[in-house]
Image (spheres, rainbow, N blue to C red):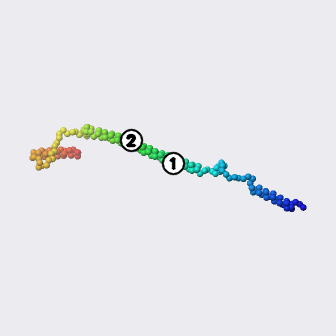
Amino acid sequence: MSYRESTALDAMYAEREEARRSQQARPSFEVVQGGGLDRRVRQGVSEDFLAWVKLAVAVAVLVVSLGIVRVSLTTATVSMLQGNSALESSIEDAQTENQNLKVERSVLSSGSRISRIATQNYGMVLTSSKEVVDVTPEGQASEGADAEATADGDAAQSAGDTSATADEA
């Protein structure tokens, strides 16, 4: 007889087999969940830190946008001032030109200059005698005055006729 078929041997093998199975099912050490440095590292970034980062980004965006607005307003102001400066210089140039034109007009319209040009270039002369034409109504003047007016009128008419024929020639 061999020991292989004995119940005692079977029980011994069964116990060993059960012990082996229980050792395989149970870990050799226990894992304890808890707090500590390792837990914080595994947890990731905290909610408070994310809130502060978001606030810092929002403040940075606000500061940059205010800077952009300030720069654009400054640029608009500078361009407006340059336009005003150009306009002022244009107005000053126009006023200077206006003063120069007034002086030139004064020089060109002087009586002595016109007389000199008329006598030298066109051969005109100033008259030494003056003719008076009386155009009073007939009822108010006396007969002697009428005779003088008629004579003066005839003389003016004949002088006008000679100047008209001179112009036509």
Q: Position of residue 38 (x, y in %)?
A: 66, 49
Choose between 109 and 126: the one closer to the eye.
Answer: 109
Question: What quarter of the picture does the N terminus occupy?
Answer: bottom right
Question: What quarter of the picture does the C terminus occupy?
Answer: top left
Q: Is residue 117 visible?
A: no
Q: Is residue 51 above or below residue 123?
A: below
Which amino acid, by three-letter code, is at mark 2?
Ser
Choose between 168 and 33: the one closer to the eye.
Answer: 33
Q: Is residue 3 visible?
A: yes
Residue in the image at 18% along x and 38% along y? 128
In the displayed structure image, the side of residue 128 where residue 42 appears, left or right: right
Disc 2 packing (10 Å; few <14; some 14–19; many ≥20): few
Label 2, secondary structure: give it. helix
Which amino acid, by three-letter code, is at mark 1?
Leu
Q: Earlier in the sequence, mark 1 or mark 2?
A: 1
What label sits on residue 89 in the rendered view?
2
Q: Quadrant of residue 144?
A: top left
In the displayed structure image, the side of residue 150 where residue 85 appears, left or right: right
Label 1, secondary structure: give it. helix
- Residue furthest out toward the right: 1
Q: Position of residue 6 (x, y in %)?
A: 86, 61
Q: Nearer the viewer, mark 1 or mark 2?
A: 1
Q: Position of residue 52 (x, y in %)?
A: 56, 49
Choose between 93 and 71: the one closer to the eye.
Answer: 71
How far is disc 1 from disc 2 in space, using C-alphas?
A: 41 Å
In the displayed structure image, the side of residue 169 where residue 82 appears, left or right: right
Residues tagged 1 and 2 counted as in contact (Cβ below 8 A): no
Q: Position of residue 26 (x, y in %)?
A: 74, 55
What residue is disc 1 on? 62
